[in-house]
Structures are given as C-alpha cells and as structure tokens.
Image (spheres, rainbow, N blue to C red):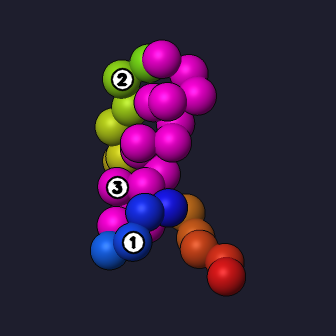
Amino acid sequence: MDYGESLEVAAVREAEEETCLKVRLLYQLGAYS
C-alpha cells in the first residue's frame, strides 16, 4: 500500500499486478488491521 492510497485502490492495484487481469471492486467484505 502506497502512502495516501485508499484501501480500495490498493486492493485493485495489487490484484491487477499479481494476475495481469482487469479488476473491479464490487463491494468490501471486511478489513482487518
């Protein structure tokens, strides 16, 4: 996760980097810290 990046943007970016697929976030299931 980059500084200032939202959880949603980071999740989509990481998924796209790892799978080389276009990803769209439909809804958030949960978040843990």
Mark 1 burial class by Cα count in 10 Å: few <14, some 14-19, many 20+: few
Mark 3 burial class by Cα count in 10 Å: few <14, some 14-19, many 20+: few
Q: Could you say whether the residue bearing mark 3 is in a helix, strand or loop?
A: helix
| Viewer-side residue, 5 vs 32 | 5
Q: In the image, what residue type sits under mark 1?
A: Tyr
Question: In screen coordinates, is 25 left or right of 30?
Answer: left
| In front: label 1 or label 2 | 1
Dot label at residue 23 = none
Task: Report the span colored magenta.
Answer: 5-20
| Residue 27 visible here | no
Please state the horizontal and vertical placement of residue 33, each as a whole percent of the image: 67, 82
| In front: label 3 or label 1 | 1
Q: On the image, which quarter does residue 31 sit in?
A: bottom right
Give the residue displayed 34% in from the left and 67% down from the top: 5
Q: Which of marks 1 and 2 is nearer the N terminus?
A: 1
Please state the horizontal and vertical placement of residue 12, each as a whole percent of the image: 41, 44
Dot label at residue 9 = 3
Q: In the image, what residue type sits under mark 2?
A: Lys
| Viewer-side residue, 30 vs 23 | 23
Tags 2 and 3 touching, CB below 8 Å:
no
